[in-house]
């Protein structure tokens, strides 16, 4: 109850400031609110090819993506920086296009101008776990909270998807009308189709992490557990993996940005913590075997046609608390394992189903074929141009 009251007070404050700034003239500019950054980065780069409008990025506390000169202005969207915070609200209130890549609660307090387009560039290619209105915990939330979620979702004029499967998930999770879902593909997957960019990134990262020289890379990239956000425990026997795999492999660990954790430095010649590296897809280029669980990262890793293992040590409890999509066990393209022994067994035996990996990649990436960024940029530009004509 106290939390809901504080949220309500904050949203009233935000609405007052936003409404005041709406008194200023609207400008032809795209304003991007980012937690992750990658989809916005690739879209902005494409948008600059078709439009001369300003692109302004508002970075929340979580975002560490290093935007380049493509972006006209980068502003911390954080109330701890009051001037920048008010400046951010001004840009939102006067934008012709707003792009977001996550759920942002402040959207429940805004009413964009009729000639402003809001595009949701969701940060995941696919979804193995439930979210939004489909998440099991929604039944425990107050009517006020549920109404707030729906108001946020209702601000999206468009939500981009890379597959029909994700389109249906968004339709249910965000309670969206089908005409708001656009099949552009996912911008950040364009990198997987650009051989020159892939080679450049692989060379740069090999220099950044020389430990991988003459070694194969295992990447462990789990999702978060809501009850472990502040004390996540890595459920791998790293010492055992080092003993049995250390001569041939190195282990990269990329935890979800929402969690805090401690990593034992005892095996620094084997383990590399890459959690703070800004783009997970770059790391996937180096990865020979992915270990994940209910994260969406396998949905794009499958584009590389490489093996993956699903370390679902808490499958039944996670399914009950957080929710998984129907047929999770049947659809994932790799073995479900419960312990480190099984992980080592699968890595050593290498008996992975390559046909299943291809099917999985096609299921989640039907529309992500290397031109997704330009597809989104063209959508934004054409929508802005039609609004300009309407004026």
Image (tube, rainbow, N blue to C red):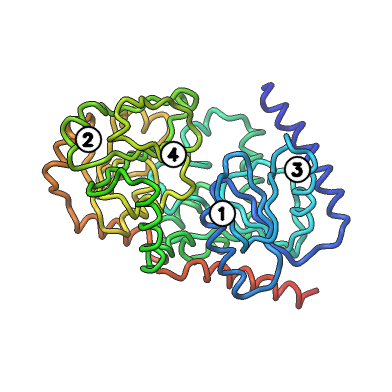
Residue 312 horizontal/vertical position (percent): 29, 34
Q: Nearer the viewer, mark 2 or mark 1?
A: 2
Check residue 381 in the rendering and tell me which mark sits there, or answer none: none
Image quarter of the C terminus? bottom right
The mark nearer the N terminus, 1 or 3, is 3
Spatial distance from mark 1 to mark 4, Cα to Cα?
Answer: 33 Å
Check residue 337 in the rendering and tell me which mark sits there, or answer none: 2
Q: Nearer the viewer, residue 53 or 152?
A: 53
Relative horizontal placement of residue 223, taking residue 307 as reference (left or right) = right
Which residue is identified by label 1? 176
Spatial distance from mark 1 to mark 3, Cα to Cα?
Answer: 30 Å
Q: Nearer the viewer, mark 3 or mark 2?
A: 3
Residue 287 horizontal/vertical position (percent): 30, 50
Dots 3, 4 in contact, CB < 8 A: no
Is disc 3 placed on a helix, strand or loop? helix
Residue 318, visible in the rendered structure: yes
The mark nearer the N terminus, 2 or 1, is 1
Q: Nearer the viewer, mark 1 or mark 4?
A: 4
Which residue is identified by label 3? 85
Dots 1, 4 in contact, CB < 8 A: no
Spatial distance from mark 2 to mark 1, Cα to Cα?
Answer: 35 Å
Q: Residues within 10 Å of mark 3 (few under 14, many from 20)?
A: some
Which residue is identified by label 4? 275
């Amino acid at each position: 109850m106290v939390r809901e009251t504080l949220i309500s007070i904050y949203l009233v404050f935000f609405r007052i400031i936003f409404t005041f700034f709406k008194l200023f003239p609207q400008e032809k500019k795209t304003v991007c609110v980012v937690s992750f950054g990658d989809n916005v980065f690739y879209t902005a780069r494409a948008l600059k090819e078709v439009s001369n409008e300003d692109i302004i990025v508002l970075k929340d506390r979580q975002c560490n993506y290093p935007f380049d000169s493509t972006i006209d202005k980068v502003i911390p969207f954080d109330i701890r920086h009051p001037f920048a915070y008010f400046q951010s609200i001004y840009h939102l209130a006067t934008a012709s296009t707003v792009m977001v890549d996550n759920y942002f609660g402040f959207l429940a307090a805004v009413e964009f101008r009729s000639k402003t387009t809001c595009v949701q560039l969701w940060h995941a290619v696919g979804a193995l776990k439930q979210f939004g209105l489909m998440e099991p915990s929604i039944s425990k939330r107050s009517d006020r909270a549920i109404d707030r979620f729906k108001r946020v979702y209702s601000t999206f004029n468009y939500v981009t998807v890379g597959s029909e499967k994700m389109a249906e998930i968004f339709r249910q999770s965000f309670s969206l009308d089908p005409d708001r879902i656009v099949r552009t593909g996912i911008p950040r997957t364009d990198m997987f189709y650009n051989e020159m960019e892939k080679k450049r990134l692989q060379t740069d990262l090999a220099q950044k992490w020389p430990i991988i020289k003459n070694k194969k890379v295992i990447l462990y990239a789990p999702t978060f557990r809501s009850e472990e956000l502040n004390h996540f425990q890595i459920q791998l026997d790293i010492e055992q993996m080092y003993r049995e795999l250390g001569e041939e492999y190195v282990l990269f660990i990329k935890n979800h940005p929402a969690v805090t954790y401690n990593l034992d430095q005892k095996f620094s010649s084997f383990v590399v913590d890459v959690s703070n590296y800004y783009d997970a897809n770059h790391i996937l280029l180096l990865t020979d075997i992915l270990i994940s669980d209910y994260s969406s990262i396998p949905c794009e890793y499958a584009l590389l046609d490489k093996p993956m293992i699903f370390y679902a040590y808490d499958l039944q409890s996670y399914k009950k608390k957080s929710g998984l999509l129907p047929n999770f066990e049947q659809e994932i393209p790799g073995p479900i394992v419960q312990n480190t022994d099984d992980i080592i067994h699968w890595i050593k035996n290498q008996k992975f189903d390559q046909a299943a990996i291809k099917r999985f990649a096609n299921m989640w990436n039907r529309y992500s074929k290397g031109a997704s960024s330009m597809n989104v940029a063209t959508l934004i530009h054409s929508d802005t141009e039609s609004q300009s004509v309407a004026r």
